[in-house]
Image (spheres, coloured by chain):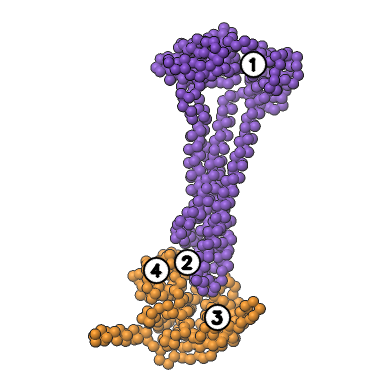
Amino acid sequence: MNIIESFKQALSSLRANKLRSILTMIGIVMGVFSVITIVAIGNATQSYMDNEFAKIGANVLAVSYKSGTINSNDVLQNDDMKAIAKVEEIKNVGTSMGRSGTIRLGDKTRNANITGISSQYKDIMPTDMTQGRMINDIDNSLRSNVVVVKEDFAKANFKNENPIGQKLRVKLGSGSSMNLTVIGVTKAEDSIFGDMMSYESQSVSLTIPLTTLQAYYPWSDQLNYMYATVESKDKEDLKKIADKVIRILEQKHGNKDKYYVQFLSEVQEQLNSVLGIVSSVLLVVAVITLVVGGIGIVNILLVSVTERIREIGVRKALGARKRDIIFQFITESIILTGLSGTVGIILGILAGFVISSAIKIPPTVDVTVVILAFLGSVALGLLFGVYPAKRAADLDPIESLRYE
Amino acid sequence: MIISMKNLGKTYKNGHIEVEALKNANINIDKKEFVAIMGPSGSGKSTLMNIIGCLDRSTKGEYWLDGVNISSLNEGELARIRNLKIGFVFQSFNLLPRITALQNVELPMIYAGVGSKERRRKATAALERVGLGERMHHKPNEMSGGQKQRVAIARALVNSPSIILADEPTGNLDSTSSEEIMAVFQDLNREGVTIVLVTHEPDIADHTKRVLRFRDGFLKSDELVRNPLDAREVLAKSNLEEENELEKA
């Protein structure tokens, strides 16, 4: 019996039990679907993160405190930035400081997140501008009352007017008020969660010079973090740089073991490995689903063998050899799993697109995974078809012809 | 000689008990013969039939079919012999229910590796030969018992086997249909087809040319039928009687 014939026969017997075939297929569809979706989302997240990290470009290091309780002597200050800038590998040093407040817009008051940034901050965490410019050196040295707003804020509040030069009145949490002039508008980012919240419910993000913000708070040249950029991504180099930075700070403050340096590349590695672990755990679950689906196939084929004992007897009497019968049942099994695999792949790719568009990550379809998933489901059919097929082929023709 | 059996025997093992179902059978059947095998249940006729049909192997003696020593063949070779040299007709028709008459008749040729066009042509010819040319696209459940058995006969014929082996072919049919089926067999035999038919009905055996009787595993008698009944004459007669009765009424 040739392949085309056995495909035709297998299809006709699967069609004879449509509901049963479909129900059996669902198990495999689910398995393949989960595998494809998980891999697709995993890959999309990975490439999104790689992209985001690549945007920052050069490697960034963050200096922070080792423990939560800080003596006044150990507090990082504005001039510490100048001190660590002397390390030759360090290119830019910057910091930011966040305070909350409110902003008066017409007759409404909204919450505002006010971030003070040092002048080199923009070189460490680059942002695209749609209009105007970012906070610079002069703003910081003059403690100018200037502000950079976000694109969506500008659109919502200034409508068709030019946002540059507009005045904003901001009340800080401490009670004091600032009158700020808009000097720049940053491009709205595609953030993962940004679009899940409505614009109205979000706090207004305002970026102002660090020194301007510090002027409103006593002892406010205390810093929580310092950021710096370095060229190297080599682990040995980074360790040396970290040591140098810490030594400078310890000398300056006369203390020991108070500061901690972390590199963005380390964070990236950690995130990637967490992502990898999550993906593999999910993948294991998906593969288990697939195996359970496969057992469903074995089960239904065994039922099918029992139901068709007589048919098998007739086929044998008419000249079917063992291998013809084996081939027939394995073909049925492969059609079941191959078809399920294809459906699962299509659904998986669709789900990948839907989910990535929902969380604003560009979708990625991994052709290798698709091909592997298909071949895998066919192999599963082969594997799970063997036992029932062997059972069918080993039936005694006389017994099976007599079977009622 | 199509069938030649020498001292053929079959012993079944049923646990520790051995049952000798067939003892020392010496049977020769020539080409173009029409033979009935008769006997009560337990007589060994089913065992003989399974051995002739290559569904089972003897435990003693030799069985030659069309010049091949069947006793020496393995399972795969037996399947090949069943496919090409034997045409089965069963009491319960044993057609596959999901496929049409034509597809059922094509089945043995699929296993013989005949190409699809040739298959269609031969299957159509076989169905026409048994008078079912018009119903070939019907499925078995859309047919009467007599029609189903004709499909089965067409299927048995289609690979031009050495013999047709019919196991109680009229057992599930009414007397008219039985007569019609016997007419088909007689026509085929006249055309040169060798037929071996197992039955327990003497009326049916009377349509054949030779009767082998079995009892307790032994061949008891081997007789020629003196004046075989012609199924077509029987049918014509009963039609006439019916008409007469209608006239009387």
Helix, strand or loop under label 1: strand
Q: How far apart are marks 2 and 4 (CA)?
A: 22 Å
Pointer 4 local density, CA inside 10 Å: few below 14, some 14–19, many at least 20: some
Q: Can residue B190 be seen in this view?
A: yes
Check residue B141 in the rendering and tell me which mark sits there, or answer none.
4
**Dot 2 or dot 3, earlier in sequence:** 3
Helix, strand or loop under label 2: helix
Q: How far apart are marks 2 and 3 (CA)?
A: 28 Å
Which tag is nearer the camera, tag 4 or tag 1? 1
Q: How far apart are marks 4 and 1 (CA)?
A: 89 Å
Q: What residue is shown at x 42% (from left), y 87% (from top)?
A: B203
Q: What residue is shown at x 43% (from left), y 64% (from top)?
A: B98
Q: What residue is shown at x 58% (from left), y 83% (from top)?
A: B21
Q: Are marks 4 and 3 in contact (CB under 8 Å)?
A: no
Residue B197 x %, y % = 47, 82
Check residue B47 in the rendering and tell me which mark sits there, or answer none.
3
Find chain A in the image and tell me its colour.
Answer: purple
Q: Which amino acid does label 3 sit on?
A: Thr
Towards the viewer: A132 or A110:
A110
Which tag is nearer the camera, tag 4 or tag 3? 4
Q: Which amino acid does label 1 sit on?
A: Leu
Q: Distance between the residues labelled 4 and 3?
A: 30 Å
Helix, strand or loop under label 3: helix
**Residue holding disc 1:** A223
Q: What residue type is labelled 2?
A: Ile
**Residue holding disc 2:** B110
Check residue A203 in the rendering and tell me which mark sits there, or answer none.
none
Towards the viewer: A358 or B94:
A358
Residue B212 x %, y % = 50, 88
Pointer 2 local density, CA inside 10 Å: few below 14, some 14–19, many at least 20: many
